[in-house]
Amino acid sequence: MTTSALILVLVSAVIHAGWNLATKKAEGGAAYVFLMAAGSALCWFPLAAWLLMTGNVTTPGAGASPFSVVVAISVSGAIHTAYFLSLQAGYGCGDLSLVYPLARGTGPLLSTLAAMLLYGERPSGLALAGALLIGVGAFFLAGAEEPQATPSDDGSSKAIVYGLLTGVLIAGYTMWDKYALDVVGVKPAFLSSAANCVRAIGMAPFFLLSKKRRAEVSTAMRTQWKPALIVSISSPLSYLLVLTALATSPVSYVAPAREISILLGTLAGTRMLEEGDPSSRKKRLWASVAMAAGVVALAIG
């Protein structure tokens, strides 16, 4: 993994943890997810349109057909839509310091395994050890937390299920987008910006053709427009940095390195949102050390 790719991924991790904190504090539902999608489309459509008009959609010599590009972008947008819905559902019934580590810890382990099976990637032993350290550290962090009580006993169980489902979706869009970049030849900037438009277009009929759901969106616009705006700008930006790194580095290196955001997201939940028990700080420290060591192993492996 190159130094420039590692820097891109680490900057992305900081931005990623920040927008997850914002969306957790919003306490929004599906209407909020649509609001984020619409905001992302409005913010990033100019970039997609400019790239399309200037012919910077695919890499030179890729030979991709317009149909394959449309399919690549549509599937990416669909998986990302499911990801945001699952993540928001998890935040609706569980703590940031529980859902976030589970989601971010499951994703890289599945991505690394899938990259080895599907793309024939062969990360070094040191890099694999780094991926394992990050994954173990993530689950150790989740186990170290004692989430605040939820309205019902199964609230925490639902949060765990949504956290794991979100991790599966993270692995799914990581693998698919790597395919879109390497096989189809879609450029990172166009893939990211166009997929944001697909998310909004795909969700629009569900929310705009129903009077009740239009009212829900209207309420979300009045009460949650600030966090939605933050996420609309920062979420695509953080992922664009990841796609740029993916274009030059293997999935099995990039996906685990992203997970340093686990530390940032968990600390944001426990410190800023006052989640968890203060007695778990020592355990969180050791888990954080394991993840930091994992990132170093990935960088030099």
Image: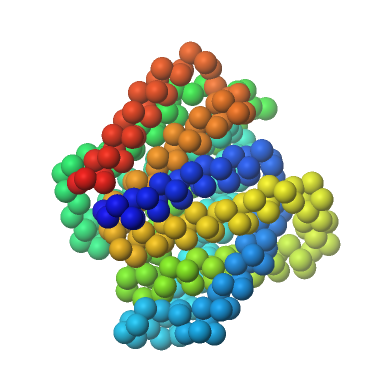
83 up-or-down from 130: above or below: below
Residue 132 in the image, given as x and y percentages of width and height: 27, 38
| Numbered circles on residues, count | 0
- Residue 151 appears left or right of 281: right
Write the residue at 63% across / 56% down.
232
Name which quarter of the figure residue 41 lies in. Answer: bottom right
Residue 115 in the image, given as x and y percentages of width and height: 28, 57
Write the residue at 41% across / 86% down.
65
Residue 22 in the image, given as x and y percentages of width and height: 63, 42
- Residue 248 appears left or right of 38: left
> How was the colour assigned to the protein in this rendering?
rainbow
Write the residue at 45% across / 41% down.
261
Write the residue at 76% across / 66% down.
208
- Can residue 2 be seen? yes
Q: Residue furthest left?
A: 125
| Foreground pick, 134 / 85 | 134
263 up-or-down from 7: above or below: above
267 up-or-down from 254: above or below: above
Residue 151 in the image, given as x and y percentages of width and height: 67, 27
- Can residue 172 be seen? no
